[in-house]
Structures are given as C-alpha cells and as structure tokens.
Image (spheres, rainbow, N blue to C red):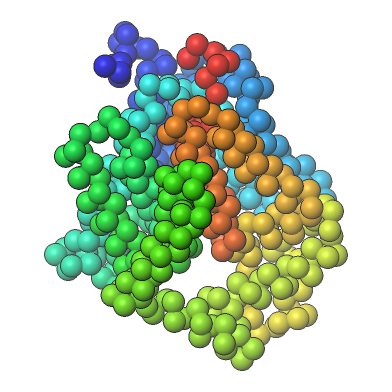
Amino acid sequence: MTKIFPKSAFDVDFIGSWLLILFGFSLPLSVSVNNIFAALLILLWIYRREYGRTWEIIKNSKVVIAVLLFFVLHIIGMLWTEDISWGLHLIKKEAKFLLLPIMMSFVKKEHIRYYISAFLLAMTLSELLSYLVWFEIIPPIFKATVYDPTVFIHHTSYNPFLAFAIYLIGYFIVFDQTLSRLQKVLLIFFFVTMSINMFITGGRAGQVGYLLVVTVLLFQFFNKHVFKALFVSIGLLAAILFTAYSTSQVFHDRANLIVTNVQKFDSNVNTSVGLRINFAINSLEIIKENPFFGVGTGDFRSSYDRVNVKNTPEAKSTTQPHNMYVLEMVQFGLLGLISLLAIFYFQLRFSLQLKEDLRKKAGVALTLLFMLIMLSDSYLLGHFTTMLFVFFSAILYRSFYETNH
C-alpha cells in the first residue's frame, strides 16, 4: 500500500504533502481557506530550511525556470512603466507563481493520486450543490442563481475547473486498469453529470475548453489512429453541442448572444463579445507602437484609455484585454509573448518525455486547456485559475530524479 501517514509525529515532508492535499481540496471552494493553506506551505518551507533542495528543483526544471522568468519580467517591466501603483498591483497578483517551486519541493510521487482525488472531491461537492440549486431543492447560495448555478466561484473560473476535472475523470475511466468495475461505473456517472453541469452554467471559455479536453482524451485513446480520432471527435462534439443547445436554456441563450453581439458590433460595441473584439483592436494599436518591449508592467490601463478615447470613445475602457496573449504583448511586446509561450513549450516538452502515463497525458491536457482559454480572458491574473495552474504544474511537471524525495 502507498504510505500516506508520516514516519513520525512531525515529519515535515509528509505534513507538506498533506497540506498540498488540503490545498487541492480548498482550491475550488474558498479563496481565504486556500490562501491559508498556501501560507502554511510557505511557513513550513521556511521552517524546513532545505533551500538547496528547492534550488535543485529549479535548476532541473525548465518549466519552473520559464515560470519564474515570466514573473521576473513583470519586475523588470517596472523600469519603463509610469503607473507604478498599478504595476505593483499586477506584480502582487503574479506573485502566486513563486509558490510553484515551494509546492514542488513538497510533492511526493506516491501521493499524486491523493492530490488529484482531493481536487476531484471538491469539484464533485461543487457540482452537487450546483444541481441542488438548479433543481431548486435548496435556495441559491453564495454566487449561484437558478439560471447560472455556480456556487463557490464565478462561471468564468468554474467552467475551466470543471473542464479539467472532467478530463481527469475521463483519464481514469479510459486508461486506469487498476480500478474496479464499480469504481469505473461511478466515474462514468460523474463524467456524464459534470458534462451536463458544464452546459447548465454560463462559462463559455470553459465550455470550449471542455470540447478541447474531450478531443485530447479521444486522440490519446486512439493514439496513432489520427483519422479515427478525428472522425469520432467531430461526431461526438457535434452531438454534444446539438444536445446542449437543444436542452440547456443558459447555453442556448449565450450561444445566440455571441451571434447577436457580432452582428451588432458596429452599432453597439458595449456587449460581452463586442468589447472583447474592441479590446483586441485597440490593444493591437498599442502593440504596434511598442512592438518589442511593450509599455511596461503597469501601463496597460493608461495606454488603453488613451487609445480607447481616440478610437472608440463610446466603448467602455478596461484594465485588461480579456486575452492573456494580448495583455503580455501590450505590457512587454514580443518579449512578453515569447516568455508566456515558453512556459507552454516546456510544459509540453516535459510531458511528452515522461514515461508515467497519468502525468504525461494530463500534463498535455492542462497546457492545451490554458493555451485555449487564455484567448478569451487573462486567466493567469485571477486567483482561482492561477492557483489551479500553479497547483497542477507542481504535480504534473515535477522532476523526481534530482532528489530522493
């Protein structure tokens, strides 16, 4: 059996690993509780004082190096920014990336399934409460409404969480040969109910991400049979979209809204889709003015206000363009885009070199999911999705050869 209990009453490594389990469980449920576990991990890391181990992890992980350089770029970008206070605000948000090597130093290979299971248990709880609100068994609580029943977090974050949870469940159904028939039946049940839950809630980026991870899962299942995977993917996704559009009021409404927003873009830019288009167009002008190094960490807001007033004074302004790639290019030009893409490149490279099936396949899925959804929002700025990215990066891209831990 996998050893899950500590060798002594105060085994720091085991306590750290258990804190990661609790962190994974709290991740979709509460910012404050999640921050408490993050703080405890930092304090335990300081108490352990094995900084050499962390340095070895950093040295031997191109993923960690790429993430830390991405963070450092935000500090360097303060040199040519004018809005210092907003720049410091953004650095504070991006400081969550510093948790990555700390978390990696506590990750235990034999506990990886516990970390994932804790996250999936929390998502199951979220899903259950979502259905209870949707069926009006309980009144709407926290952030939920009957029309859009996401309980603990807004649908813009909930649906990407749900997409990755569905992928992980799908992985265990398809590839895990150690599970009993009853366990697989239960997982199939939750795969279906979470898939339905995906389309009774309103996060469109997460819904597109769901379609992507299902496709990734099918391609991984069919392996080298690319045309078969493509054929099955197209048929299945068409069936999912048709069913969701026909049966889910919120999905039906929000899908129609995309079409309406695009059609009325010239006459009304202040719509969800219209504003995103406008953000991109105006941001592109800023990028053309500062193509290589951008405007600096803190000057997106003021630069965008200037261009927006000139080009589209009737449109609402913004503090970020709802596209992570565009944001990085405005802030740091081509350098910012390369820095962001480097993270994804090294994640994919690491995953594809792994022999371990779970981390290999899930590592590819996590990278592709974030690469896609960040076209519609700056998902490495928000608390929930940044923490999701850091937590699973620590688990999936951790090298174990450099230490005995």
The one nearer the camera, 127 or 189, is 189
Considering every residue shown, the one lying at the far top of the view is 8
At which x and y percent is residue 12? 41, 15
Instruction: Decide: is 357 above or below 33.
Output: above
**Residue 151 visible, this angle:** no
Task: Kindly give the residue lying farthest to the bottom in the view shown.
Answer: 267
Question: Viewed as shown, does residue 76 lie left or right of 351?
Answer: right
Q: Does the image show residue 322?
A: yes
Which residue is drawn at the image coordinates 36% and 66% (left, top)?
240
**Where does the image place residue 400, in percent across and percent down from the top left?**
52, 19
Say which residue appears at 30% left-offset and 42% top-offset.
173
As drawn, 81 above or below 200 = above
What percent of the width, then of the height, locates residue 11? 37, 12
Q: Quadrant of residue 345?
A: top right
Near-viewer residue (108 or 314): 108
Q: Residue at x 42, y 76 (%)?
A: 254
**Image quadrant where one finds the N terminus:** top left
Q: Position of residue 171 (x, y in %)?
A: 37, 42
Tell which of 92 and 106 is nearer to you. Answer: 106
Q: Quadrant of residue 255?
A: bottom left
